[in-house]
Image: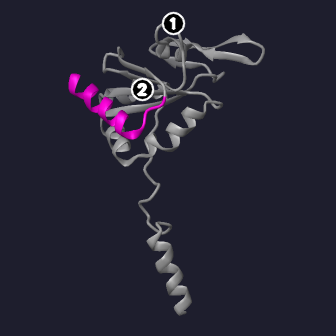
Amino acid sequence: MRYFVQIIILLGSVGVLKPEAGYAQIQKVSFEQLDSIEIQDVKNVFLFIRTDWCKYCHKMDQTTLKNETIVKLLTDHFYFIELDAESKTNIKYQGRTFKYKPTGNDTGVHELAKQLGTINGKLNYPALVVLNTKNEIVFQYDGYLNAKELEAILKETLHKM
């Protein structure tokens, strides 16, 4: 019994048993949901454009977007949409249907990702986009951001709106 208590104390001290550790999650919505939920609660949109093969996308998803401060900021002030830039699923948004456009054998890009994430004629991953309540692009960035960097950008973006 004593050995069992020591294990429990040890596990608790290294964070294994802390219920709050690692549970920060952003509520995600889809473009299709936006039209109906914006009627009830008007918010800006934060768009995370990613691909399955992008190591910086995965890193940002596993670190920055799990940070408690970032989760709170995004949940309180934005609708969060994660868009796979290579998704072959049609997306209906603002009365229009956006589709996957092949660019070669087994390659292509979703036209909504291209339309919203392109900066200076290029679409790089991850691409971060903020849309205001009028669905206008007010911020774009392509590349990895850590939690402190993203927090500063989100606060500045909110301040300007």
Check the image and name the residue furthest to the top.
Answer: 121
Specify whether residue 146 is painted magenta: yes
Q: Which of 18 and 3 is in front in this view?
A: 3
Q: Where is residue 136 in the image (x, y as percent from the top left)?
A: 35, 14
Note whether 83 is above or below 92 in the view shown: below
Q: Which of marks 1 and 2 is nearer the N terminus?
A: 2
Q: Is mark 1 on a helix, strand or loop?
A: loop
Q: Residue 155 carries which label?
A: none
Note whether 145 is above or below 71 in the view shown: above
Q: Residue 121 carries which label?
A: 1
Q: What element carries label 2?
A: helix
Note whether 137 is above or below 75 in the view shown: above
**Which dot, 1 or 2, sits closer to the camera?**
1
Specify whether residue 31 is painted magenta: no
Three-letter amino acid code at disc 2? Leu
Three-letter amino acid code at disc 1? Gly
Check the image and name the residue furthest to the right.
Answer: 105
Q: Residue 34 carries which label?
A: 2
Residue at 54 percent across and 39 percent down: it is 59
Check the image and name the residue furthest to the bottom.
Answer: 1
The N terminus: image quadrant: bottom right
Indicate left or right for 148 with 117 as reference: left
Residue at 38 percent across and 26 percent down: it is 45
Which range is magenta? 144-161
Circle 1: is it few (<14), some (14-19), or many (20+) Cα within 10 Å?
few
Q: Which of 6 and 102 is in front in this view?
A: 6
